[in-house]
Amino acid sequence: NIEVLSMTTPPVDNRDAAVECKEKAEELLKICEFERALKLLRRAARLHPLQGLDEAICQAEVAAKGHNGMSHASFGCDAAENGRDADTVSDRDSGVEEVERVLGSCSHYSTLNVPVLTSDAGQLKRQYHKICRLVHPDKCCHPRATEAFQRVQVALDTLSDQTKRVAYNVLQQQQQRQQQQRQPPTATAPHQVVSPEI
């Protein structure tokens, strides 16, 4: 007699392995390790069809691609909750803050966090490397990390080339003058209308 295994129900020991993979993936999602979590969720799906697994895979795929405004907060990333090394979590938080700072910068100098009109190539490169370590898309889970990383690259490219830097400085000065001309004069005390006494 040949025993035929059911093709619809995987063995029970695979279910336990799938549950373990899913639990590990959930922990990785909390600390913004989206790619690793996605691999574990897919492995769990191959091992056993767990309830809610398809939805978790979809969420992890979206987060891994950085779409729909997913950020570390979307999965509750928090140093106290996940038990992860505090330095690693603070680096991630610093990266998210740095992305926001870079995206809010109004000039290449502020993007690289250097004084205006800095031309010291060494200082520019040091700042570039320091910021890139924080905002690099592989290190930071902010959905706009790629955009911030590209802005930092453009800032270094512009400011480290003398010709581009001079042209950029001239453009910045022109824009500042135009803004000053557009601003209305500062308001003085309102004029009082005095009615003549009769």
Image (cartoon, grey):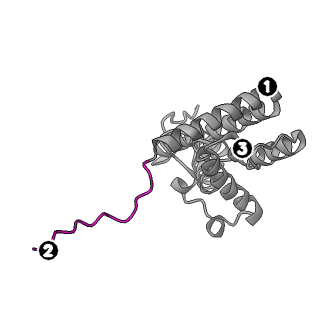
Q: Quadrant of residue 174?
A: top right
Q: Residue furthest bottom?
A: 197
Q: Quadrant of the N terminus?
A: top right
Task: Name the outermost residue toward the left.
Answer: 198
First to last magenta residue range = 184-198
Q: CA distance from mark 2 to mark 3?
A: 60 Å
Measured from the top left, where is residue 40 in percent x and y? 64, 44
Alpha carbons under labels 3 and 1: distance apart:
16 Å
**Residue furthest to the right:** 122
Horizontal side of residue 29 vs 160, given as left or right: left
> In the rendered view, would you say 90 is above or below 67?
below
| Mark 1, secondary structure of its residue | helix
| Kind of residue at disc 2 | Glu
On residue 197, which mark appears? 2
Please tell me which residue is depicted at 74% across the width and 66% down the height of the picture.
86
Image-quadrant location for residue 23: bottom right
Q: Which residue in the structure is indicated by mark 1? A: 163
Q: Nearer the viewer, residue 97 or 46?
A: 97
The residue beneath circle 3 is 109
Please, what is the three-letter code of the amino acid marked with disc 3?
A: Tyr
When the figure is inspected, residue 172 is found, relative to residue 34, above or below; the finding is above
